Image: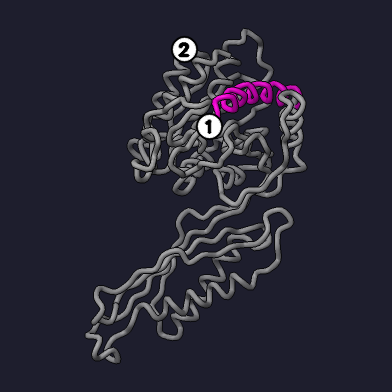
Amino acid sequence: MDEKRAIKILTDLLAIDSANDHESLVADYIVALFANYPVQIERITYKPGRDNLVVTLGNKGPLLGFSGHEDVVDAGNQTNWQFPPFTPTLYDGKIYGRGASDMKSGLAAMIVSMLDLLESGKKLPGRIRLLASVGEETGEYGAAQLTKKGYVQDLDGLIIGEPSNFNIRVTHKGIIDYYVSSSGKCVHSSIPQEGKNAIMPLIQFAQQAQSLMDSHQEKDPILGSLTHVISQIQGGNQINSVPDQAWLSGNIRTTPKYPNDQICGELERIIAKLNSQGAKLSIRYSYPEVPLPDQSNSQLARLAQEVVQQEFGKDCEFTAGTGATDASEYIQAGNFPVIILGPAEGKTDHQPNEFIKIEDYLLGCKLYQVLAWRFWQEYI
């Protein structure tokens, strides 16, 4: 492995501002890296400026998926950064920049491993398909698009390069983001009986929803409890008017004990009951994602743990995640094993001064290549 090239690939990716958009610039860069190699490259446009990318290496044999998302979260107030977020900086054994941990380091390490395999001069007994998705940070809609178009259904296994500190995340919670809107009638606050306060039914909904979610006490043995947060509420125009419009939002982290369909049905029944009592409420969802079922007994999870421990001498545990990943979409394509395994620690995700240790990134580049070889040997 050419370490200078590996670091350049990561820093080049970090220099691209793909915060919640502009993923086509990342796709352009990756296409250029593979342009002179015998691979199949496909761009799948989500919307202008937002291209998923699928790069397939090899022609036959077991098909291993590599998954990474091209977008990053917004950098926020840049005065809080020690170094400019889109000017990648090497300092004190680390690479700083937005996306260094979540998750351009995982994506870059997968790319480097594929390039090294292509340049190895060895006959490859299997295939790799890189799935570089858009919109993971705001709803996994790139992964949903790739799944619907059939790019996942023939995989024999999938590794998602989200930060895991070389542990293997074998399950994670699902997510339901919901919005409840309320309509009323605006009048002067001195005659409230002539109007209809849109805020009051929202308060009733919030209380009933929180009480119901709190009643779900059965814990998943790995993921723990379902959680629910009323995260936003807004309504009214001024203090001396009865508000005719109001809305709130909530975030639920689900487990297999309480599936998404069950929870959505419960919220909708609260809405229906309140509406039957005179409220005018409606609910909508923003890209709900199902939990990742436990993968700890899969051949892929055990193989990856063995490689990390025996080939690289690192501690490696099976862990669970509280946040969703593209896995929530990909698992809907079929019954193949999925694990989350990435080189970053994950301690600075979505924060100022996000970084990855250089030694961890370079180890990740090697790890994915070794793991691919072992996967092909095991699955032939």
Instruction: Find disc 1 in the rendering and name its residue.
Output: 356
Q: CA distance from mark 2 to mark 1?
A: 29 Å
Magenta region includes residue 254: no
Residue type, mark 2 in image: Asn
Identify which residue is drawn at 34% across, 35% down.
49
Decide whether the magenta segment is chiefly helix, strand or loop.
helix
Residue situated in front as seen by the camera: 41 or 172 = 172
Horizontal side of 242 relative to 109 (left or right) equals left
Q: Earlier in the sequence, mark 2 or mark 1?
A: 2
Q: State the SS at label 2.
A: loop
How many marks the image carries: the answer is 2
User: Is residue 180 rendered to the left or right of residue 268?
Assistant: left
Q: Is residue 23 visible?
A: no
Disc 2 vs disc 1: which is toward the camera? 1
Q: What residue lies at 58% left-to-right and 47% top-to-bottom?
A: 328
Tell me the quarter of the picture where residue 74 sits: top left
**Span of residues in magenta:** 357-378
Q: Residues within 10 Å of mark 2 (few under 14, many from 20)?
A: few
Against 273, residue 263 (above or below) is above
- Locate the N terminus and report the quarter of the image it occupies: top right
Residue identifier under label 2: 36
| Viewer-proximal residue among 320 and 181 | 320
Give the quadrant of residue 119: top right
Res 59 seen here: yes
